[in-house]
Image (cartoon, rainbow, N blue to C red):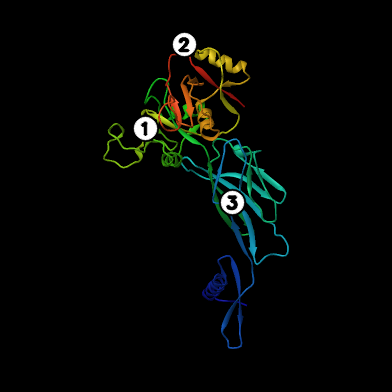
């Protein structure tokens, strides 16, 4: 039967409009005419729901972590459906585009990039699409998105992963304000740490970190935390907080750095030795004891999470001399906990040494 083109277009529009009215918010509705001639809407489909029991997960570098994600249908299905699971990751520092982590359908799965071989789906129960990462690496923090795809329908949920650790200020052995952005990043990595994010520095400030020297952060800004306003630290006319110099030139501008470390593995200890040691001797005696000279980040973690408390100053791997105090007392520095620093003395001077065993 021949139908005029304008009439055909009109019929197509009516059909699409009718379908759009009956398919809404993941549900399919069916029109049924009742005895009074009024249209009644009856539910005749299922809806996919994706949920997480935690939207922020804290972990420690080098450990394993599970990012929760579960999916289900309303109403509940009698038989399982063929679904595809995809996890994406967006870095914490600087944002950027999402990157693939893993894709799975049934028993088949594939992981990508730096996550290859380190990730899997937990699958403890029907609908469990939780992501297991083992071991956690230094750059794994950020925003993860769990996406469930069922035919043309997909739903997702977001989980943020943060490391639990400690922020510490760090400056070059050459002196204050000697590091550009790339050098600051490298300096933190050499001390078993990374450049801190603003959120990590802000949390450290809330916990009492007070430091007048400005340092690089992971987003390329330069900031510093002040708990007690004073003339030597920006003046007394400003309230306590994290002061910012804003974004700076990565190569030309030079400051200190704020590092963040989260690897709680191994043991840091003060090596008892009958005589004071030069830096070269300190490196040697740690090796003879079956370990290695400790890094600054390792000492901070041992102080913060293992309660390392020792009043004797000791060499560290960067050539600095420091000691950790958790119980302030007479003849042990200031009246608050912290890692005390003697800076970078001449390497022929005699001190103790802090060693590390994995």
The residue that mark 3 highlights is 146
Q: Is any atom of residue 186 visible in this view?
A: no
Q: Earlier in the sequence, mark 2 or mark 3?
A: 3
Residue nearest the viewer, comparing 164 with 148: 164
Relative to 216, 133 lies left or right: right
- Does 344 sit above or below residue 58? above
Residue at image point 36% right, 32% down: 214
- Visible residue check, residue 352: yes
**Residue 257 in which image quadrant:** top left
Residue at 29% in and 31% down: 232
Residue 31 lies, in percent from the top left, at 60, 77
How many neighbours does mark 2 have within 10 angstroms: few (below 14), some (14-19), or many (20 or more)? few
Question: Could you tell me how far apart the alpha carbons at marks 2 and 3 are, in whole angstroms?
Answer: 55 Å
Above or below, 349 against 135 in this view is above
The residues bearing labels 3 and 1 have C-alpha atoms spaced at a distance of: 38 Å
Are dots 2 and 1 in contact, CB under 8 Å? Answer: no
Which numbered tag is attached to residue 348? 2
Q: Earlier along the polypeptide chain: callout 2 or callout 1?
A: 1
Rounded to the nearest whole Å, what is the CA distance between mark 2 and mark 1? 30 Å
Where residue 214 is drawn, which disc sits there?
Answer: 1
Question: Which structural element holds mark 1?
Answer: loop
Residue farthest along the front direction in this orientation: 330
- At 35% from the left edge and 32% from the top edge, which residue is drawn? 212
Q: Measured along the vertical axis of the image, is residue 273 above or below residue 90? A: above
* Quarter of the image that includes the C terminus: top right
SS at mark 2 in the image? loop
Instruction: Name the secondary structure under disc 3.
Output: strand
**What percent of the width, then of the height, locates residue 24?**
55, 68
Q: Nearer the viewer, mark 3 or mark 1?
A: 1
Q: Nearer the viewer, residue 330 or 309?
A: 330
Q: Position of residue 110 (x, y in %)?
A: 66, 44
18 and 241: which one is in front?
241
């Amino acid at each position: 039967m021949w139908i005029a083109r304008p009439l055909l277009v009109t019929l197509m529009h009516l059909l699409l409009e009718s379908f759009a009215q009956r398919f809404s918010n993941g549900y399919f509705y069916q029109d049924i005419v009742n005895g009074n001639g009024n249209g009644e809407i009856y539910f005749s489909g299922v809806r996919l729901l994706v949920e997480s029991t935690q939207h922020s997960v804290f972990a420690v570098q080098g450990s394993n972590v599970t990012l929760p994600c579960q999916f289900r249908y309303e109403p509940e299905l009698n038989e399982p459906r063929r679904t595809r699971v995809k996890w994406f990751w967006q870095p914490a520092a600087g944002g950027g585009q999402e990157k693939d982590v893993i894709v799975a359908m049934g028993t088949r799965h594939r992981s990508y990039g730096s996550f290859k071989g380190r990730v899997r789906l937990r699958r403890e129960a029907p609908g469990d699409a939780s992501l297991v990462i083992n071991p956690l690496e230094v750059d794994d923090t950020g925003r993860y998105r769990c996406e469930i795809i069922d035919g043309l329908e997909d739903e997702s949920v977001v989980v943020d992963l943060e490391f639990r650790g400690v922020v510490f200020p760090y400056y070059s052995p050459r002196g204050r304000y000697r590091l550009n952005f790339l050098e600051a990043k490298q300096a933190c990595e050499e001390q078993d740490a990374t450049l801190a994010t603003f959120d990590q520095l802000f949390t450290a400030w809330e916990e009492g970190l007070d430091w007048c020297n400005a340092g690089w952060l992971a987003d390329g800004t330069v900031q510093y935390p002040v708990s007690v306003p004073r003339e030597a630290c920006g003046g007394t006319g400003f309230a306590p907080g994290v002061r910012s110099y804003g974004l700076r030139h990565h190569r030309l501008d030079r400051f200190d750095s704020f590092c963040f470390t989260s690897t709680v593995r191994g043991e840091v200890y003060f090596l008892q030795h009958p005589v004071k040691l030069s830096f070269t001797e300190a490196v040697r005696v740690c090796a003879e004891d079956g370990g290695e000279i400790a890094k600054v980040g390792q000492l901070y973690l041992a102080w913060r999470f293992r309660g390392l408390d020792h009043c004797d100053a000791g060499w560290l791997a960067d050539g600095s001399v420091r000691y950790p105090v958790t119980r302030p007392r007479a003849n042990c520095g200031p009246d608050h906990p912290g890692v005390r620093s003697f800076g970078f003395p001449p390497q022929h001077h005699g001190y103790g040494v802090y060693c590390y065993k994995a």
